[in-house]
Amino acid sequence: MTGKEKAVDFFSKGYNCAQSVMAAFAGDFEQDESFMLRAGAGFGGGMGGSRITCGAVSAMVFLAGLTLGEYAPEDIQSKKRLYDRVKLLISEFREEFGTTECRELLLKASCIPKPDPSVRNAEYYSKRPCAHFIAKAAELIQTHLLTDKN
């Protein structure tokens, strides 16, 4: 199963967007799946239901830090490399969907953003566009982060 397939599968099991993306790549980043699920929990609903940054985008930024974030505070070049990679990830996601904001992504799909978690059932999954955002984030991670790990 690819990282993209794993991420969508986690979402279909009820995990939020960030958890789904982060857990799908746990092994690639030498982390426990349970750690990634805990670490991503608060990013759900666009950061705790506030509907700001999409959880899939937050997951990309988190994983970029795991990939490129080990540097000394005074190492400006390495910090710039990380920031440039984060900007690239965000730019490509935004290019695909027009925004990185959870609220806007849901409204574009005619979903009414709610601050509290929703019950996951067939109706929820039939209306929710989130699997597309998760899949794109997984593709971007594969392309722009995992290539650096080799």
Image (spheres, helix red, strand yellow):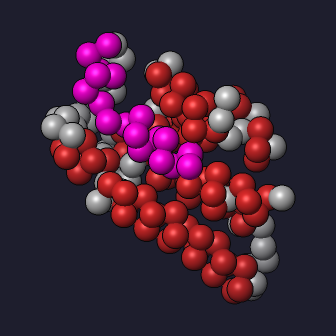
Q: Is residue 44 visible?
A: no
* Residue under the image location 76 percent in, 47 percent down: 29
Viewer-proximal residue, 88 or 17?
Answer: 88
> Which quadrant would the C terminus be assigned to in this image?
bottom right
Quarter of the image holding residue 25? top right
Residue lying furthest top in this view?
A: 121
In the image, 74: left or right of 42?
right
Q: Which residues are magenta?
A: 122-139
In the image, 70: left or right of 86?
right
Instruction: Indicate whether residue 132 is drawn in magenta.
Output: yes
> Which quadrant would the N terminus be assigned to in this image?
top right
* Residue under the image location 52 percent in, 70 percent down: 88
Vertical position of residue 73 compared to residue 3: above or below:
below
Vertical position of residue 16 compared to residue 63: above or below:
above
In the image, 48: left or right of 67?
left
Residue 45: percent from left, percent from top: 36, 39
